[in-house]
C-alpha cells in the first residue's frame, strides 16, 4: 500500500512539476521584466519539485516504501467533501443563514448525530453565525436569489 | 504621459456653485459609495472625508462599503450590477482601469459610467538628503553621464509610477534599473538606506520623512507647480517632458439619468469650494479638478486616460 | 460625544480591554485576521480622540495575535497566520486531553512575549529602527532563506517529501501578479487570483479542512477519556521548564518584528525550530511538547510590539495590521515617523500605556473565556465537526466576501488530505507559501540593482551573515539528525 502511495506521490510531483514548468515558460515576457523574468523562479521551483518527486520514485524503487500508516476512511471523507461543495453551490441561491444552517444539520447528521437535537443545533448555529458575521461584523454575506437578494 | 490635457488651465474659470444651490431633492435616501480599498487605505479615507462635507450639501445619507478582492474587479462588478438610480457609486482610481487591462474581468472599467473626476494626485520624485542630487535635472544629468548605473524605485510593478520611470529612462537614455517594490514603505527604506538613487510617489506617502528632513524633493510631475511647494520645479521646467497624473473620482452603473449627474457635479463643486474641505485636501497635496466634475468631461477624461495606459502597457508588453 | 472619549486614562484602559476582547474573538475566527479585525473597528475610531482610538486599534492587534492560537490548539485551525506553528504541539496536547494546559501555556507565554516586546519597544526603538533601515533587498532575500532553512529540520522523517512540500508551497506563492514585471502569472485569467493566494487560506485548508476530512471517518471520542475541562495556568516548575523556549521566542520575535515584511509567522516557526534544537527533550516536539507551544506563542506576541518600531520611528508599516494602525494615526492628523516623538509624545506614551493594559487585559480575558472555550470543544463530535466547518466556511468568506475563496480552501483541504496520506509534511508547504513571495521578489530586486551580479548577496554584510547562519543551522540539523540515527 504505502509503496504504491509513495510511487503515486513521486509521479504526481513529477507531472505537476512538468505542467507548472511548461506554464512558466509560456508566461509572456514584457518590457518591464528583469533578467530573471516572471518565469525564472517558477522554473527553479518546478525543478525543485521534480527533484523531490524523482527522489521519492527512486527511493521507492530501491528501498521500498515506508511503513504504512493508519488509513482514514476515504468514503466518508469524500461524503463530507460533497456536502461542503453543495454548500458552496447553494449559498448564492439560498442565502447565507439558510445555507449555513443546512450545512450544520447535514454535517452533524453525516457525522452520526441523530434526533431533533440536530435541527435545534442547526437553527441556533445559523442564528448565532448570522448575528455574529452579518450583524456584528457587518460582512455582506449573500442573502440568496430565492429571496430577492 | 497622461498630460496634454491642460487640465489645470481651466481651473481659473469662475465657479458657478453657489448659484445652483436651489436644486431638486436627491432621489434616494442613502447613497452607497463602494471602494476596493480596505478601511484606512487611501480611497477609504478619501471617501469618508468627502462624505462628511457632501452630506449637508446634498441632503442625503452616505455609506462607505469596502468591497475588497480581485484588485478592484469585485467592487466594479458590484456597482455595475446596481440599479442606475443614483444609489451606488464606485470610487475610481487608475487601479480599476489597470485591473481591467491586465486581467480582463467580466466587468471592466468600461462597464461603469464615469460620473466625476474630483482630484488629481501629483507624483513627486525624491531622494534622501545625503544624496548629491538637489534637482531632477541634476539627477538626470548624472544618469545620462553614466548610463546604466543609476537605480530608481517605484512602489508597485506595472503601476503608473513604474511606467513613468520607464518613460523617464526613454527620455533621458539613462538605462537606469527601475526596481518595483511592495508598496511605498518598502520603497522608502531603500531610498533612505541609499540602495536607490531616486524614488517616485505621492506626497502624502513621503510626508513623514519629508517633514523630518530625511528626504528631499527633486521635482514634481505635474503641469504646474504645487501650491504647497512653490519652490519645487516641475519636470518640464527642468527640461524633462514628463507629466504623470493619478486621479480620484466617482463612477456609477450605466444608464443613470442626466439630472442625477448634474446634481452631483454642482454638489461636488460646492464642496471643493468650501474652505473646510479645502483645508483637508490641500494638506494631502491633492489638486482639485473642478473642470472635470461634469459627467461629459469625466467620461472623456477616463476614455483618454484608459487609452493612454493601454498604449503604455502594450508598448511595455505587460498587457495584450 | 467627543468629550465622552476624552484622553482620560481610565477611558483609555477601558478601550484597551474592549479592543483586546474584540481582537481575541476576531483572531479566534479563522479568516478574520488581525488586520481585518482592526479594519472593522477603524471607522468607529474616526470620531474618537487620538489616544483612545490608537490604543483601541493596537489592543485589537495584541488580542488578535493571541486569539489565533485558541482554535489552533483546540481544533487545529490556525485563526491567524502566526498561530500556524502553535497547531503542531498545541493540538497534539489537546488530543492528549491536555487542552487546558496548552491554553494556559500559550496565554502566559503570550504575556511574557507581549511584555518583553513592550520593554524593547520603549527602550530600544531608535537602535532597532536602524536595524530596519539596514535591510536591503539582498538582506531580505537572505532572511527568507534563513526562514526556509528551517525546513531541513521540520520535514519529519523524509527530507525528499519535505522538498516536495516546500516546492508546492513556493508554487502557490508564485500565483498572482508578478512582483517585478506586473504580468499576471498562473491566474487562469481570474481576477480573484490576481492578488495571489492568501497564506491563511492554505493554512486553514491544510490544517483544519484536512483534519475534518480525516476526523469524519474516525469513531466518536470515548466519553471516558480524561480531558481537561478547565484552563490550567503553568505553575512555577513548568515556567522554569519553559524559560528557555520563551527566551528563544522573545529573541527571534524582536528581530523578525523589526524587519518590515517578515512578521510573526516566520518568527513563530523559527522560534519553534530553535526551541526544539536547544531543548533538553527535542524528541517530545511534535508529540505535544509544552515548549513547542511556548516558543511560537511568545515569539508572535513579541512581534505585536516590535512590529510597531518601523511604524512609529520611520512611518513605515511592516505588515497589514501596521498599515491599518497607520490609517488610524492619519485619520487623527498624526503622521508616524521621525517627528512623532517630538510632535506628539503624549500619543506615543499613551500608546505604550495602552499596550501594557492590553497585555494585562489579554490574560484576564483569557482566564474568563478559555474555560468556556474548552467546554465548547468537548461537545459531542458530530456537533463539533459541524460547527467547525461552518466556522471555516463563514470565516473564509469574510476575508474578501468571496465564494471563490471558500471553494479554494475546500480544494486545498482535499490536497492536504491526500498529502497526508502520502506522508508529505505540512510545515514546509506553509513556510514555502509564507516566504515564497519575499524570497522571489527580493532575489530579483537584488539582481536588478546589481545588474545581474550574484555577488550582491555576499557583498551585503547583513545578507552575508544571515546566509552563513542559514548554512550553519542547516548543517547542524543534518549533523544532529545523522548522529541520532547512528
Image: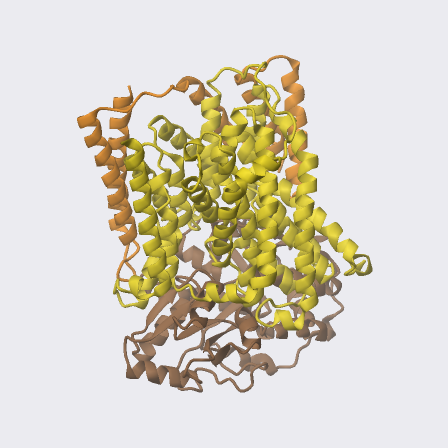
Chain colours: A orange, B brown, C yellow
Q: Which residue occupies 78% across, 54% down?
A: C11
Q: Which residue occupies 30% across, 38% down?
A: C164
Vertical side of C379 occupied by B10: above or below: below
- Numbered label tally: 0
Q: Nearer the viewer, residue C356 or B95?
A: C356
Q: Is residue B56 visible?
A: yes
Q: Residue A108: x percent and y percent? A: 57, 20
Image quarter where the N terminus of chain B lies is: bottom left
- When asked about the image quadrant of residue C370, the answer is top right
Vertical side of B80 occupied by C107: above or below: above
Vertical side of B246 occupied by A140: above or below: above
Q: Please, which residue is most extreme toward the top here?
A: A115
Image quarter where the C terminus of chain B lies is: bottom left
Q: Residue B161: x percent and y percent? A: 43, 68
Q: Which residue occupies 51% across, 31% down?
A: C91
Q: Residue C12: x percent and y percent? A: 74, 55
Amino acid at each position: 500500500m504505502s509503496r504504491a502511495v509513495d510511487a503515486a506521490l513521486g509521479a504526481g510531483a513529477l507531472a505537476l512539476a512538468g505542467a507548472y514548468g511548461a506554464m512558466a515558460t509560456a508566461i509572456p515576457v514584457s518590457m518591464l521584466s528583469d533578467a530573471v523574468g516572471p518565469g525564472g523562479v517558477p522554473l527553479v521551483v518546478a525543478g525543485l519539485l521534480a527533484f523531490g518527486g524523482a527522489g521519492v520514485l527512486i527511493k521507492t524503487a530501491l528501498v521500498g516504501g515506508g511503513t504504512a500508516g493508519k488509513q482514514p476512511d476515504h468514503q466518508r471523507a469524500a461524503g463530507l467533501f460533497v456536502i461542503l461543495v453543495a454548500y458552496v453551490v447553494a449559498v448564492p441561491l439560498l442565502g447565507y443563514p439558510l445555507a449555513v444552517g443546512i450545512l450544520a444539520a447535514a454535517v452533524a447528521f453525516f457525522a452520526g448525530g441523530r434526533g431533533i437535537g440536530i435541527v435545534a443545533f442547526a437553527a441556533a448555529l445559523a442564528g448565532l453565525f448570522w448575528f455574529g458575521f452579518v450583524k456584528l461584523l457587518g460582512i455582506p454575506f449573500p442573502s440568496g436569489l430565492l429571496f430577492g437578494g | 504621459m497622461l498630460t496634454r490635457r491642460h487640465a489645470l488651465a481651466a481651473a481659473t474659470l469662475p465657479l458657478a456653485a453657489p448659484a445652483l444651490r436651489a436644486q431638486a431633492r436627491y432621489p434616494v435616501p442613502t447613497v452607497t459609495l463602494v471602494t476596493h480599498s480596505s478601511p484606512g487605505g487611501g480611497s477609504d479615507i478619501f471617501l469618508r472625508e468627502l462624505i462628511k462635507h457632501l452630506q449637508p450639501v446634498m441632503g442625503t445619507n452616505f455609506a462607505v462599503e469596502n468591497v475588497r478582492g480581485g484588485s478592484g474587479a469585485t467592487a466594479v462588478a458590484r456597482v455595475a450590477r446596481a440599479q442606475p438610480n443614483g444609489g451606488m457609486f464606485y470610487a475610481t482610481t487608475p487601479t480599476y482601469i489597470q485591473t481591467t487591462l491586465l486581467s480582463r474581468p467580466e466587468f471592466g472599467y468600461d462597464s461603469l459610467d464615469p460620473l466625476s473626476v474630483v482630484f488629481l494626485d501629483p507624483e513627486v520624485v525624491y531622494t534622501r538628503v545625503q544624496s548629491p542630487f538637489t534637482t531632477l535635472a541634476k539627477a538626470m544629468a548624472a544618469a545620462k553621464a553614466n548610463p546604466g548605473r543609476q537605480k530608481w524605485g517605484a512602489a508597485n510593478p506595472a503601476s503608473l509610477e513604474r511606467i513613468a520611470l520607464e518613460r523617464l529612462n526613454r527620455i533621458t537614455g539613462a538605462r537606469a534599473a527601475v526596481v518595483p517594490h511592495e508598496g511605498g514603505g518598502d520603497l522608502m527604506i531603500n531610498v533612505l538606506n541609499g540602495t536607490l538613487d531616486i524614488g517616485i510617489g505621492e506626497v502624502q506617502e513621503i510626508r513623514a520623512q519629508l517633514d523630518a528632513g530625511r528626504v528631499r524633493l527633486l521635482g514634481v510631475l505635474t503641469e504646474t507647480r504645487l501650491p504647497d511647494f512653490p519652490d519645487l520645479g516641475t519636470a518640464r521646467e527642468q527640461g524633462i517632458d514628463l507629466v504623470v497624473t493619478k486621479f480620484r473620482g466617482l463612477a456609477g452603473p450605466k444608464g443613470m439619468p442626466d439630472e442625477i449627474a448634474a446634481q452631483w457635479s454642482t454638489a461636488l463643486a460646492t464642496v471643493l469650494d468650501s474652505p473646510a474641505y479645502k483645508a483637508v485636501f490641500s494638506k494631502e497635496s491633492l489638486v482639485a479638478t473642478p473642470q472635470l466634475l461634469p459627467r461629459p468631461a469625466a467620461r472623456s477624461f477616463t476614455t483618454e486616460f484608459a487609452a493612454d495606459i493601454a498604449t503604455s502597457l502594450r508598448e511595455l508588453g505587460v498587457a495584450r | 460625544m467627543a468629550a465622552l472619549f476624552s484622553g482620560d486614562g481610565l477611558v483609555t484602559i477601558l478601550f484597551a480591554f474592549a479592543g483586546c476582547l474584540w481582537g481575541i474573538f476576531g483572531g479566534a475566527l479563522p479568516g478574520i485576521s488581525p488586520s481585518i479585525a482592526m479594519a472593522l473597528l477603524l471607522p468607529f475610531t474616526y470620531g474618537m480622540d487620538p489616544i483612545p482610538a490608537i490604543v483601541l486599534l493596537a489592543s485589537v492587534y495584541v488580542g488578535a495575535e493571541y486569539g489565533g492560537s485558541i482554535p489552533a490548539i483546540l481544533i487545529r485551525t490556525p485563526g491567524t497566520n502566526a498561530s500556524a506553528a502553535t497547531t503542531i504541539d498545541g493540538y497534539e496536547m489537546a488530543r492528549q486531553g491536555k487542552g487546558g494546559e496548552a491554553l494556559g501555556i500559550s496565554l502566559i507565554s503570550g504575556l511574557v512575549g507581549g511584555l518583553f516586546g513592550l520593554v524593547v519597544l520603549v527602550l530600544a526603538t531608535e537602535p532597532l529602527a536602524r536595524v530596519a533601515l539596514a535591510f536591503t533587498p539582498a538582506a531580505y532575500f537572505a532572511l527568507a532563506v534563513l526562514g526556509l532553512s528551517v525546513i531541513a529540520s521540520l520535514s519529519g522523517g523524509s527530507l525528499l517529501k519535505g522538498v516536495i512540500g516546500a516546492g508546492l508551497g513556493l508554487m502557490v506563492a508564485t500565483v498572482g501578479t508578478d512582483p517585478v514585471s506586473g504580468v499576471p502569472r498562473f491566474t487562469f485569467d481570474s481576477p480573484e487570483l490576481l492578488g495571489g493566494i492568501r497564506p491563511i487560506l492554505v493554512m486553514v485548508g491544510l490544517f483544519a479542512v484536512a483534519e475534518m476530512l480525516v476526523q469524519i471517518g474516525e469513531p466518536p471520542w470515548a466519553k471516558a477519556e480524561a480531558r481537561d475541562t478547565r484552563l490550567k495556568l503553568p505553575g512555577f516548575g513548568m515556567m522554569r521548564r519553559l524559560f528557555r523556549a520563551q527566551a528563544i521566542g522573545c529573541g527571534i520575535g524582536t528581530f523578525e518584528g523589526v524587519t518590515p515584511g517578515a512578521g510573526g509567522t516566520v518568527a513563530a516557526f523559527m522560534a519553534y525550530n530553535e526551541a526544539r534544537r536547544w531543548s533538553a527533550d527535542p524528541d517530545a516536539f511534535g508529540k505535544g511538547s509544552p515548549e513547542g507551544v511556548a516558543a511560537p506563542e511568545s515569539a508572535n506576541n513579541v512581534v505585536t510590539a516590535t512590529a510597531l518600531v518601523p511604524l512609529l520611528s520611520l512611518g513605515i508599516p511592516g505588515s497589514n495590521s501596521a498599515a491599518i494602525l497607520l490609517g488610524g494615526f492619519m485619520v487623527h492628523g498624526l503622521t508616524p515617523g521621525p517627528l512623532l516623538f517630538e510632535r506628539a509624545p503624549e500619543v506615543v506614551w499613551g500608546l505604550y500605556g495602552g499596550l501594557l493594559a492590553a497585555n494585562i487585559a489579554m490574560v484576564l480575558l483569557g482566564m474568563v473565556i478559555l474555560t468556556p472555550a474548552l467546554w465548547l470543544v468537548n461537545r459531542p463530535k458530530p456537533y463539533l465537526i459541524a460547527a467547525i466547518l461552518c466556522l471555516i466556511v463563514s470565516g473564509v468568506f469574510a476575508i474578501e466576501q468571496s465564494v471563490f475563496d471558500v471553494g479554494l480552501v475546500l480544494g486545498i483541504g482535499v490536497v492536504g488530505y491526500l498529502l497526508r496520506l502520502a506522508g508529505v509534511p505540512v510545515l514546509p508547504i506553509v513556510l514555502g507559501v509564507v516566504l515564497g513571495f519575499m524570497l522571489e521578489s527580493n532575489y530579483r530586486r537584488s539582481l536588478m540593482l546589481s545588474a545581474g551580479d550574484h555577488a550582491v548577496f555576499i557583498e551585503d554584510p547583513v545578507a552575508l551573515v544571515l546566509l552563513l547562519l542559514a548554512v550553519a543551522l542547516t548543517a547542524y540539523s543534518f549533523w544532529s539528525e545523522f548522529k541520532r540515527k547512528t
